[in-house]
Amino acid sequence: MNAIHARWWGVVQGVGFRASARRIALANGCVGWVRNLSDGSVDAHIQGFQAAIDASVAGIAQLHGRRIHSVSVYRTPLEGSLESFTIVASATAADVAVGSDRSEQAPK
């Protein structure tokens, strides 16, 4: 099992992005969560077999590609208590950290 954290920037809120990300991840057998961020981006934790994670990220890109301006994907530790893939409450962009000590910024 592996896990990734992904964050998408662009026209990704108010267009069904989270619901479709959830549907795609579940269809690929992944668990995790997806949420809106206050800066207009969307982030997700996707966990499963690597091929399933890759298929989920590719499926999201295929469905929403023209809306996505940039994306950041990196490996992250497994979250042990996940049983499904859920849409969780929105967060402020400042609440999102990369690693343990720096905030993630939109790619330039």
Image (cartoon, rainbow, N blue to C red):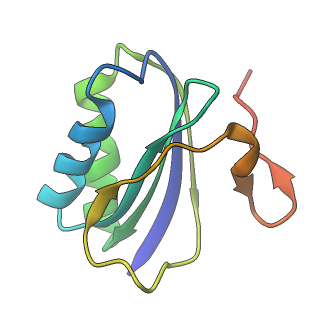
Residue 38: x %, y % from top left = 61, 31
Above or below, 40 against 76 in this view is above
Task: Name the residue at the right extreme.
Answer: 101
Task: Name the residue at the bottom extreme.
Answer: 80
Residue 19: x %, y % from top left = 24, 40
Residue 61: x %, y % from top left = 33, 32
* Image quarter in which the N terminus is found: bottom left
Above or below, 95 against 77 in this view is above
In this picture, residue 12 sits left or right of residue 41: left
Residue depicted at x 25% and y 52%: 55
Give the mark count: 0
Toward the viewer: 85 or 78?
85
Residue depicted at x 57% and y 36%: 37
* Image quarter in which the C terminus is found: top right
Residue 107: x %, y % from top left = 70, 28
Toward the viewer: 95 or 24?
95
Figure quadrant of residue 99: bottom right
In this picture, residue 95 sits left or right of residue 15: right
Figure quadrant of residue 12: top left
Residue depicted at x 66% and y 40%: 92
In this picture, residue 57 sits left or right of residue 79: left
Residue depicted at x 45% and y 86%: 80
Above or below, 51 against 39 in this view is below
Toward the viewer: 20 or 54?
20
